[in-house]
Image (cartoon, rainbow, N blue to C red):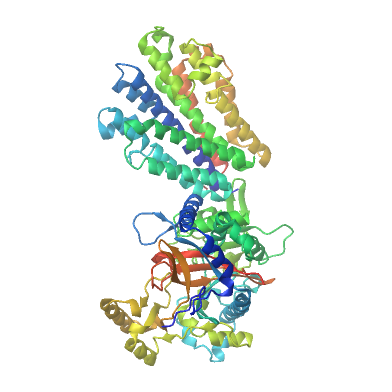
Amino acid sequence: MAMFDEMQADGGQVRSAYSTLDGWLCDEDAARLRAKQREAEDLFRLTGITFNVYGRVEAEERLIPFDIIPRIISAREWQRLERGIEQRVRAINAFLHDIYHRQEILRAGRVPQEMISSNEAFLPQMIGVAPPGGVYTHITGVDLVRTGPDDFFVLEDNARTPSGVSYMLENRETMLRMFPELFSRTRVRPVSDYPRDLRRSLAACAPMAHEDAPTVAVLTPGIYNSAYYEHAFLADKMGVELVEGHDLRVVDGRVAMRTTRGYRPIDVLYRRVDDDFLDPLNFNPESALGVPGIMDVYRAGGITIANAPGTGISDDKAIYSYMPEIVEFYTGERPILQNVPTWRCNDKDSLAYVLAHLTDLVVKEVHGSGGYGMLIGPAASKKELRDFERKLRARPGNYIAQPTLSLSTVPIFTSKGLAPRHVDLRPFVLMSPEGINVTPGGLTRVAMKKGSLVVNSSQGGGTKDTWVLED
Amino acid sequence: MLGKTAGGLFWMARLLERAENTARMIETGQRIALTRAGSGADDWLSVLQAAAMSQGYLDKNGEIAPDLAIDWMLRDPDNPSSVMAVVAQARTNARLVRTALTHEAWEAVNSCWMRLRDALARKVPMRDLPKVLSLIRERNALVRGAILGTMLRNEIFDFIRIGTFIERADNTARILDVKYYVLLPSAAAVGSRLDNVQWDTILRSVSAEGGYRMAIGPDVTPRGIAQFLILDKRMPRSLNFCCDKLGDNLNYLAKDYDMRLPCHAQADTLCRRFMSHDINAIFDYGLHEYVQEVLDHLARLSAQIEIDYRFYG
């Protein structure tokens, strides 16, 4: 498979976006860079940017590996990505509104009825509910991969509670602290406005008119959640309270937080808790993370929940395969960003094809995430292939399959110098009645192992600072 | 501010103060062991008692051995009040209230925990003990410095200070409670070797041996010690000093919130009833009874603050 390296063209010459970095690297001493790499890790530990790995007994806090070589995107490349992302998020939001109201897209036959009605991610409690400002997806993290100069594919639309934005911000802070001279030579667009933009965007979605600024809060499952650091980080940078379920209760028809002076109502809740745990009265009765009755307040227009409950139906992997139709249906335009060709295994012919080509394909669970429960055909052992074949035959509707893309590479710094590794990109997108805002940059995840295509942090992936260059 | 956050700040400060006090006790015990011939198990027992850790220690180890006593106070995983356990809990509280702390304050707490986790990963050999103890003190001083130097003087700061001074008062009162008998006039066979050791222990446990000389003079007497540790307003670990500061920070909150609560009345009572007499009156009343009542009052005040400011619901 031909591999696309973002820094070096096939002939070995460095692409123009990377030329300044390349010049700087040539002058740098490898020992100094190694020391910088260690310094970066110390900085991360001190700040406490750690995550907890699910499925491990010890509640150990681990660092996500950070690589000091930035990933660089030219102004021209970014312009096109930005337009494509905006178009996609607009379409997703329109799709969600439609699915929970008139369901025109089903009537038009562009998406089959059963994709919605039998989908676990569809929330009947949201039918007919109008979220404040008409916004469902306040925050989206669109996962992109690249295979060639102009070939960007959307791998996933994370429209529930995408995480990783704190890494985007802290990676940049760390780079600024370690390599100030590099930034004086290159014009990199800043990402540090994100927390302020997030707060403004959330406040603009408040349910009712306010004299004072609306009260925003971040809802976290607590300090043992794998992304707790990020929840605290965002609340801190936005200057809002970080609350847990037991800090909240419904008082006089509003959701209120327990302060040292009594209960105070909240207007906008940026929740980092899944739908299922949001409200034990309306969803999972076992949940201790949520707020009993919050859905009733929400339906009565007393609070904004970001993202809206039920957005999972739009980033479901089975719905994903219909995204080109969805984008066209609601925007009237051709999709700017491509979808990865996807076989839906509940279709008999597709299943037959997938089973016949299992060694070439990536197979994913429709509702899975984080790189769990997926099969990478080319890298799988005979036993893994056999096991997956059995699973596919037993519950074909639970799986989709995609070709193994040859993800682009960007060099990482290793003990033996620079070495190419596969990457993806998650830009973060804010939506409010005032418009859509794509932060210039995002989270670049990198597979630290040679040849590996899995970039998930839970599976040993690392991160890089992502530079979008000024025009 | 969230009630939970107020509680997290209060406990973070209490636990850090406790860790430092425990380290100081170990230092005292070690100093006595090294400088006084013939000292032994009894001295370590009284150090464990002053740190309120003797029961757990005896349940596990049966008899007193200096290295085991030190390990128990520093890092034994079975001791939930060891320096390591207490610092870990303080850091968990700091994580919980991360949004209320400045970057510097959080990093100071986090690095305190990281450094101690490394230093206390294994049993500390005797020759490394001074280094480890000063590390604990230094790291705590860094946290205090970061808090004093970077935090706004607002409700957040008040809850931190309230936690600090309740814990400190409690600690000083506990030392007096365990040692009151060596301060009683009947036991004052002045100048006996045993008494000198005991008095030295008391002063060193609150880092007061130098302060005492400066404030009171070279002659160490039971009455002087009691006066210094209970009533002296210059001494930052005396009961009077701590109660005074406690009252100040509670009053700032009352003013800030425009709300006087039951805890304010309790704090007033504490100062009025226990800190306004002279030392003779306290001895007449009974030192032991007096200290017991102060401890009791501090515990009730702490519980009342939790209720009044809705730490838990």
Where residue B167 appears, x then y in whole percent? 49, 32
- Of residue A418 and residue A108, the one placed in the foreground of this image is A418
Above or below, comparing residue A96 to residue A308 in the picture: below
Q: How many marks?
A: 0
> Does residue B120 appear to the left or right of B305 in the view shown?
left
Q: Position of residue A16 (x, y in %)?
A: 58, 74
Q: Is residue B283 left or right of residue A297?
A: left
Where is residue B92? Give x, y as percent. 46, 47
**Image quadrant where residue A284 sits:** bottom left
Q: Quick check: A455 left or right of A236?
A: left
Residue A427 in view here: no
Q: Residue furthest right?
A: A211
Q: Quadrant of the N terminus of chain A?
A: bottom left
Which residue ends up furthest to the front in the rendered image?
A: A27
From this view, report whether residue B215 is shown above or below residue B63.
above
The residue located at (36%, 11%) in the rendering is B193
The answer to which of B11 and B112 lies nearer the viewer is B112
In percent of width and height, residue B98 lies at 54, 49
> Quadrant location of residue B136?
top left
Establish if B259 lies above or below A436.
Answer: above
Q: In the picture, which quadrant includes the C terminus of chain A? A: bottom right
Q: Is residue B189 visible?
A: yes
Image check: A409 left or right of B34? right
Q: Against B137, is B38 above or below? A: above
